[in-house]
Image: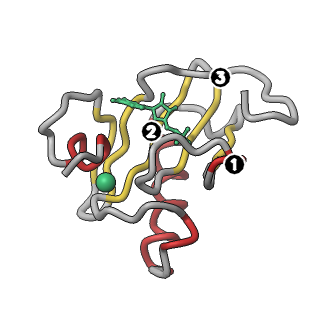
Amino acid sequence: MECIFCKIVSKEVNSTIVHETDHIVVIKDINPQAPTHLLIIPRSHCPTLLDCDDRGLLGEMLEVAKEVAKKVGVDRSGFRVVVNTNDEGGQTVYHLHMHLLAGRPLSGRMG
Ligand code: 5GP
Ligand code: ZN
């Protein structure tokens, strides 16, 4: 399996894990675009949001985003969640994931 996020969730590749559930792993982004930049990654491989029909999992990703925002203390100040999809959506890793960004005022763009 060549997928970097599959390797991360299986712990074949190291990352800083901040939260785990049965279905999801949350890690720190290796190249943070904000003081808090986390990646909410399903354990199961699905290339993009367009390929995922699992409403339970998609809902759980948002639930986990809320929980983790509280856990790292950015819930009151505020945060953003983003799912980059396909080339012009800025997706570079083709294993579904959600970004959680916080820690400075975020303008219209993701960065
Ligand atoms: P995308 O551009 O696909 O929405 O987001 C992929 C994200 O994964 C990027 O923000 C990138 O910095 C992050 N990333 C890529 N490879 C690794 C890695 O090996 N470890 C970690 N922690 N993050 C990674
Ligand atoms: Zn994968």
107 relative position to 93: left or right: right
At x 45% / y 80%, what residue is drawn?
A: 54
The amino acid beneath tag 1 is Gly
Give the vertical position of 47 relative to 14 (above or below). Answer: below
Q: Could you tell me how many numbered marks the image carries? A: 3
Name the residue tied to disc 3: 103
Dots 2, 1 in contact, CB < 8 A: no
In the image, 53 versus 102, the foreground residue is: 53
Identify the disc placed on residue 48.
Answer: none
In the image, 73 versus 1, the foreground residue is: 1
Q: Which tag, 2 or 1, sits closer to the chain's start?
A: 2
Which structural element holds mark 2?
A: helix
Query: Which of the two discs, 1 and 3, sits closer to the camera?
Result: 1
At x 25% / y 50%, what residue is drawn?
A: 6
Which residue is outermost to the right?
108
Name the residue tied to disc 1: 89
x, y percent for residue 7: 21, 43
The amino acid beneath tag 3 is Gly
Q: Quadrant of ligand 1?
A: top left
Which structural element holds mark 3?
A: loop
x, y percent for residue 70: 52, 42
Q: CA distance from mark 2 to mark 1?
A: 28 Å
Q: Is mark 1 within 8 Å of ligand 1?
A: yes
Name the residue tied to disc 2: 71
Q: CA distance from mark 1 to mark 3?
A: 23 Å
At x 72% / y 47%, what residue is drawn?
A: 88
Which structural element holds mark 1?
A: helix
For label 2, the crowd category at 10 Å Cα-Cα, with few meaning under 14, some 14 to 19 and many 20 or more, is few
